[in-house]
Amino acid sequence: MACAAARVAAPGAFAVFDLGDSSTILWRDADGFLRAFANACPHRGTRLLDGCGQTPNIVCPYHAFSYAADGRLLAAPHLDAAPALKLVPQPVEERYGLVWLDFGCAQTLAEYLEPLDAELQSRDLAGLRLDSEVSVELHCNWKISADVHGEALHVPSLHPEIAAAVDHRGAKITRLAPHARLDVEARIDDLGTNVLLYIFPNLHLNLHADYALIFRHRPHATDPTRCSFDQIALSSAAGASAQPPQPPRSVALDDAAIGPVTSADLRIAERVQRGLSTGQVEPQLTQPERLLSWMLEEIEGRLRDA
């Protein structure tokens, strides 16, 4: 999952998605068609864009070669004859108000997400407003960051301020291979049920009646003890502004956009990394943490098959 579709909704809007060493430009053309290209100039390999914004065409910052929304070379201003160059396209698809990139999956996106389709269709994430998008650099492996959000066992000790409001002991965990669902009932009538969808391997959708939080866990390009935690906040579109959403921000753990509950989750993830790095323990998962076991089974199975 690269971004919320609202991030690249307007003609000319672009957003860059980085995952490890890979970098992809998402770009909406003038006809409303969403395209994706490798974020590298086919001339000499220069990274083309950063962040997000609006542009009628992509201009390489090195030699000013410019490219149209279909990827073709428009101009090479310092050459008498333009070379035969074209941006490298990437498979991209919009579904459920989100933008997805294909890094070589054997299934179509529809097939991959089929176990979650009914729930995602009913949520209408496309009708929600993009409120904020923030990233935190963590000193832990991406799987540890993901683990924190896959169980409710830690709620009483890590989140005492909300423990009385939710039935963490009654949490219902459903395997929807390769994905999963975690339902936590509220003890306060107007809060409803917190539905968390885990989308293998690195995405959580925290779904509520009128808002949603998307948690993404991106591995570091070179250091397995670091990762990026991304939070995308969506809310009811009532009173939505016609202005484009604010650009993504890199923030600290205690930023107001993260909030105290998620901040506590991220801090404990870093402590888990520090403990595991001693090499003196082998984690033992309990029944309420079986979603984490399923995730590891999926990862190990795919590594065996690779």
Image (cartoon, grey):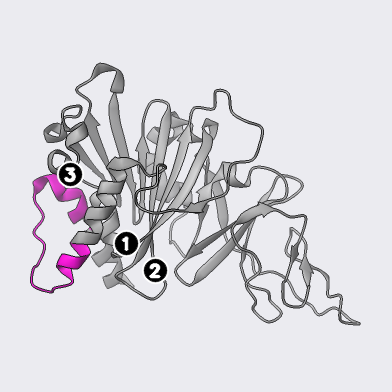
Residue identified by numbered label 1 = 142
Range shown magenta: 272-295
Query: Could you say which is closer to the camera, residue 135 or residue 197?
Result: 135
Packing grade of label 2 (10 A; few <14, some 14-19, many >=20) is many
Mark nearer the N terminus (2 vs 3): 3
Q: Where is residue 170, by image quadrant?
A: top left
Query: Could you say which is closer to the camera, residue 118 or residue 160?
Result: 160
Q: Are marks 1 and 2 in contact (CB under 8 Å)?
A: yes
Residue identified by numbered label 3 = 158
Q: Are marks 1 and 3 in contact (CB under 8 Å)?
A: no
Q: Amino acid at mark 1?
A: Trp
Measured in 3D between alpha carbons, the distance from the residue under mark 1 to the one under mark 2, in whole angstroms, is: 8 Å
Residue 214: percent from left, percent from top: 40, 44
Q: What residue is at 50 percent from the left and 42 percent from the top?
A: 132
Q: Of the numbered discs in the image, which one, if any, rests on residue 72?
A: none
Measured in 3D between alpha carbons, the distance from the residue under mark 1 to the one under mark 3, in whole angstroms, is: 20 Å
Element type at marker 3?
A: helix
Q: What residue is at 42 percent from the left and 72 percent from the top?
A: 221
Packing grade of label 1 (10 A; few <14, some 14-19, many >=20) is many
Q: Nearer the viewer, mark 2 or mark 3?
A: 3
Residue 234: percent from left, percent from top: 47, 36
